[in-house]
Each structure stands twice: as structure tokens, then as C-alpha cells.
Amino acid sequence: MGLALHGQAGPNTFAALEAPNITSNVTADLVAPLFPSAPRVNVQFQLPLVLKALLDATVADKSIVLMALATIPAETAVFVPIVVWALVFH
């Protein structure tokens, strides 16, 4: 099938698995209504960064994109990055 054995699911692997990269179909117009508390400008600016991170990690299939978007309002209702502080337990 011509797939490289490198332990990563790249574009060829996704095509072979029929798990296409859907990020080109995910737009601010589509996503903004899902975040009614978020200013549209936040979605327009941050969404490409979220999608790029998923692409860079080669996990940009439909289920992962949907799960990633679903976690955003749980962390920040306004679609902006948050600072996560490490907790140290003694």
C-alpha cells in the first residue's frame, strides 16, 4: 500500500484508513455559533491555532476535532488560551 513504517498517522495513513483531515471544513462561521459566550473575533483568531495544533499532532480527524472543540467551553467560555498552573503536592 506504500505506507511508511514510522509510527505516525500522517496524511497517507489517514487516507488509507478513510479518516480524512477535516480541518479545511471547520470554519469560524461554523464554529462561532457553538460558543455563544465567545466574542467572534476570539474564535476567528484562536480556531486556526487549535486546528494547526491538531494537524501538527496528526490527529485532525472528525472525532478528535469535535472532542477538542467540545473541551474548550469547559475550560474557557470565551475561546481564549488559559494559563494552567502545575499543582505541587507535598
Image (cartoon, helix red, strand yellow):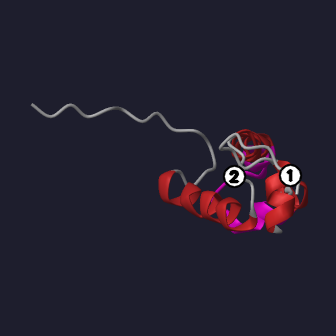
Residue 84 magenta-highlighted: no
* Residue at figure coordinates x 73%, y 42% from the top left: 46
Please state the horizontal and vertical placement of residue 90, each as a whole percent of the image: 9, 31
Alpha-carbon neighbours of circle 2 within 10 Å: few (<14), some, or many (≥20)? many
Q: Position of residue 24 (x, y in %)?
A: 90, 55
Amino acid bearing label 1: Asn
> What stretch of residues is rendered in magenta?
30-44
Picture coordinates of residue 49 (x, y %)?
A: 74, 39
Q: Which of marks 2 and 1 is in front?
A: 1
Q: Determine the CA span between mark 2 and mark 1.
A: 13 Å
Looking at the image, is 62 positioned above or below residue 60?
A: below
Residue ID for mark 1: 12
Drawn side of residue 68 relative to residue 1, left or right? left
Residue 42 within the magenta-colored segment of the rendering: yes
Residue occupying the point 86% across, 57% down: 27
Amino acid carrying label 2: it is: Val
Residue that numbered label 2 is attached to: 59
Residue 87, quarter of picture: top left
Element type at marker 2?
Answer: loop
Give the position of the N terminus as an image quadrant: bottom right
Task: Work out whether residue 50 can be spotted.
Answer: yes
Residue depicted at x 65% and y 44%: 7
Q: Residue at x 62, y 42 (%)?
A: 80
